[in-house]
Image (cartoon, coloured by chain):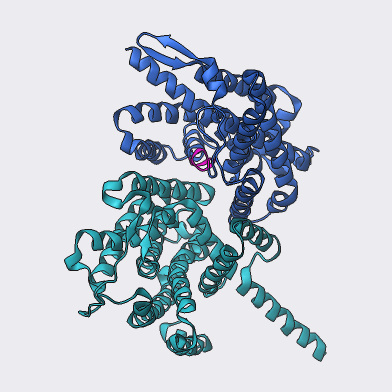
Chain colours: A blue, B cyan
Amino acid sequence: MENWIIYILNGLYFASFLFLTSLGLSIILGVMGILNLAHGSLFAIGAFMAAWIVGAFGAKAPITIFVIALLAALGVSGLMGLLLETSIIRPMYQRALEYQLLITFGALLLIEDLIKMTWGGTAYYASKPFDIMGNLVIGNNQYPLYFLFVILITIMAGIGVWFIMSKTRIGIMLRAISMDREMARAMGIRIRKLNTLAFGMGAALAGLAGALIVPTTPALLGIGMEPLIMAFIVVVLGGLGSLKGALVGALIVGETRSIGIVFFPEIELPLLFLIAVIILVSKPQGLFGR
Amino acid sequence: MGLKDTFLIPRFLIYVGIFIFLLFMPKLLPTYQLMLMESGITFAIMGLGFNLLLRYTGLLSFGHGALFATGAYAVGMMGEYFPDLYRIEIVIPISLAASLIVSAIFGFICVRHTRIFFSILALALSMVLFALLVKLYNITGGSDGIHIDLPMMFGKSFEGMKRFEFLSGAYYYFLIGIFAACTIIMLVIVSSPFGKALQSIRDNEERAEMIGIRVRRYRWYAFVLSGLYTGLGGALWSFVNGHVSPEIAEWVFSGEIVYMTLLGGFMVFEGPIIGAILFTYLKLYAVSITQYWMFIIGATLIVLVLLLPEGITGGFVKLFAKLKRGEATGAV
């Protein structure tokens, strides 16, 4: 029984990353209709930024520095997102799907090498915050408090995004754009500005997720690839552009992974895809798709 | 256009000219350049298949790397586990069969969606294969991959021969023979009623359904055909490369496939062929001058999408049309 609590908590922890990453992807996909293949690279920027800050300044007060690092990662990835949107994504809205995908693929290659140029090809370690927070004892098992910290941050971020999307003027305008672009434009909504904002927001969320992962794994080149693929599955499962979908999709994928790793570690990923396929064959729009 | 007319048009005469030129290639190019050329030709075979899906069916797959890997790994595993049957005339059909199975499964799932979801699904499925190739290391050699030995070819053994001798000799002619056959078969496919049906699905799905085309079924067929070409490309490539590793199943390689096709220009039948060969040289050049080759490839890709979206062949077609119009107005 106690083991199961651990599995489920681990699943929640996985789900937190997936939720943060796929939330950004889902916002961009929903508002702009663009699948951002460079999303994983924005995740990686966040990871490197946070790991670098914690490694360089985190000797004395790791937790405070780590919180600063989280904000810095959020900021840098967000800025990178703004830059990407205004420079290369913007001319793509009217173009065919192939071009939209390819331009973000080009951005992905570019950013991967930019990371290599900035931080070199070496790994960055930032396990201090993880070590310092210690463990929670559940029966005979120990559960790292850091995992709970991640879950907490994710819940906060999720509530923040939900609040922005459903209660503020900007959020309502963003949803209007995702429902009907032409009509939103006709109503006088400034689409260009809001597109940039939405892209920046999605990118910042990816950066936050990247920063949260570095206390448990070192920041390496290509660190953003797996989260990107997982986020795709979450988005496909949950349905396009839906906050609820991203949450439920992330929970399904996270828990499946956590339990799958324990019982059949070799086929944990194929199992996930099997679930995705079953859901898609029976409900092609995803669980909460329109 | 009937089949007979297809073979009489000037395009076909140009093909014959190029084929004859290719026959003399080993005399003209240094061995190393020839090997690059061969690698480009295997990509070109794949590009033909890829474009059947993109240009003629309107589906953009971001997971063709997995199908390429299927063909290549089929060769590698045959060499590993069935050395007695390691003859090129047996290995190639077997890797075709493997590609058939994998692309039938992938296609069955993917064609339930179109547009962006099709791309995501193809990508996600290709990552399953990638994960399996890495994790089942007992069978697949894990991230180290499998070494490809020189195969027997029509009863002739090449044991003790250096790979470059093999590649610049018999294998080269075998390769361009297959390449020529593939090009002609694909030309026949796209101008056949089947190919026209695919194009009608691409242009208007509902109308195609109304005139009795089974849309999903036809998309599936197109996916499988495309997968066969891609797998064949992978199998042939494995002999040139001498080694297969899981990177070719990863989606970054799938992205490169899309890039090649776009570079050559996917609106022209021959575009992917030109793109594939050019890409091979471009990538090698970028890798040789800097460790930041991804930066160069990414930057050229972005420039290409922004400035030359029809690719090289598309650009030429446009230029040609412009010149013609210029002449016409000049005459008046």
Where does the magenta region start and end?
A: A223-229
Q: Residue furthest left?
A: B84
Residue for point 26% across, 47% down: B138
Provide residue A102's location: percent of width, then percent of height: 60, 55
Q: Is residue B92 left or right of residue A60?
A: left
| In the rendered image, the vertical position of residue A19 relative to residue B241, given as above or below | above
| The quadrant where residue A77 appears | top right
| In the rendered image, the vertical position of residue B168 relative to residue B229, given as above or below | below
Q: Is residue B126 left or right of residue A195?
A: left
| The quadrant where residue B170 appears | bottom left
| In the rendered image, the vertical position of residue A157 relative to residue B55, given as above or below | above
Provide residue B164's location: percent of width, then percent of height: 38, 76
- Res A130 visible: yes
- Res B224 visible: no
Q: Is residue B30 magenta?
A: no
| The quadrant where residue A182 appears | top right
Residue for point 67% across, 40% down: A180
| In the rendered image, the vertical position of residue A7 relative to residue A220, given as above or below | above
Q: Residue furthest front?
A: A59
Residue for point 55% across, 32% down: A125
* Quarter of the rendering occupied by the N terminus of chain A: top left
Q: Nearer the viewer, residue A135 or B256?
A: A135
Q: Is residue A228 magenta?
A: yes
Predominant secondary structure, magenta span: helix
Q: Nearer the viewer, residue A213 or B114?
A: A213
Residue for point 53% across, 89% down: B10
Provide residue A255's location: percent of width, then percent of height: 41, 26
Q: Is residue A215 left or right of residue A60?
A: left
Provide residue A86's location: percent of width, then percent of height: 75, 47
